[in-house]
Amino acid sequence: MKFFVDTAEIDAIAELNALGMVDGVTTNPSLIKKSGRDILEVTKEICDLVDGPVSAEVTATDADEMIAEGRKLVEIAENIAVKVPLTWDGLKACKTLTDDGHMVNVTLCFSANQALLAAKAGATFISPFLGRLDDINLDGTDLIADIRQVYDNYGYETQILAASIRTVNHVTQCALIGADVMTAPPAVIKAMVNHPLTDKGLDAFLADIKAAGIKIL
């Protein structure tokens, strides 16, 4: 499973990228606002930093305006994936931008039917939102499983980009189901290393090293 980082913070992306943990980046207007940077400037910096797809979201809701914004965004770098909402206008923009040869990430997906429409419109990525479904007492991982089955049934090449990942358990579940990509905040990715038995074992080793006076350098 590919790891995308869901942030517009350059330092956080660089830290994970240095460890080989970054296959791409996703941004949205809220993350851009949090960074305090100009959208074109920070997106260009991210694209220069990572080799994989960088999702940059349009701000318009009308198809023609989304297409125009998308064409502006792809001028930033070759690895831009234009992010559009899962609406009829968003699907129209997806089809046009895909036909132009650009990557498109269709976001705010909450049903398998929506995912099917996005695949037929040529989406490169579909972004189902797990956490937001969990917020209304639905199991977001069920949606990932449904989309995986639908896409596999018919050979759709659209990649399932599990989004709104909030816990390390979300990551595990998406990997088991077969999501192609997951995008998560840096804190969630870094938390994946944590386990109480690892900490306990390390403490025991350190105690033995000290007691034995073991030194390597």
Image: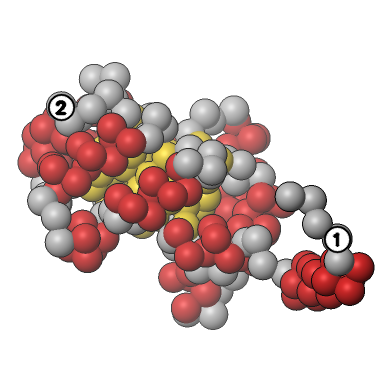
Q: Quadrant of the N terminus?
A: top right
From this viewpoint, is residue 60 visible?
A: yes
Q: Which quarter of the picture shows residue 132?
A: bottom left
The residue that label 1 is drawn on is 214
**Dot 2 crowding, Cα within 10 Å, few <14, some 14–19, many 20+:** few
* Residue under the image location 30 percent in, 50 percent down: 10
Circle on res. 75: 2
* Residue under the image location 47 percent in, 78 percent down: 135
* Residue under the image location 38 percent in, 55 percent down: 12
Q: Give the CA separation, mark 2 to mark 1.
A: 57 Å
Q: How is the image coloured?
A: secondary structure
Which one is in front, 88 or 51?
A: 51
**Dot 1 crowding, Cα within 10 Å, few <14, some 14–19, many 20+:** few
Q: Compared to 186, does 57 lie above or below?
A: above
Q: Earlier in the sequence, mark 2 or mark 1?
A: 2
* Image location of residue 211, percent across then percent down: 89, 74
64 left or right of 74 in image: left
From this viewpoint, is residue 161 visible?
A: no
Q: Which amino acid lies under the numbered mark 1 shown in the image of this protein?
A: Ile
The number of callouts visible is 2
Q: Which quarter of the picture shows residue 152?
A: top right
SS type, badge 1: loop
Which one is in front, 18 or 3?
A: 18
Q: Which amino acid lies under the numbered mark 2 shown in the image of this protein?
A: Glu
* Residue under the image location 58 percent in, 54 percent down: 144
192 left or right of 6 in image: right
Q: Compared to 33, does 8 lie above or below?
A: above
202 left or right of 128 in image: right
* Image location of residue 126, percent across then percent down: 43, 44
2 vs 1, front mark: 1
Q: Compared to 189, does 122 lie above or below?
A: above
SS type, badge 2: loop
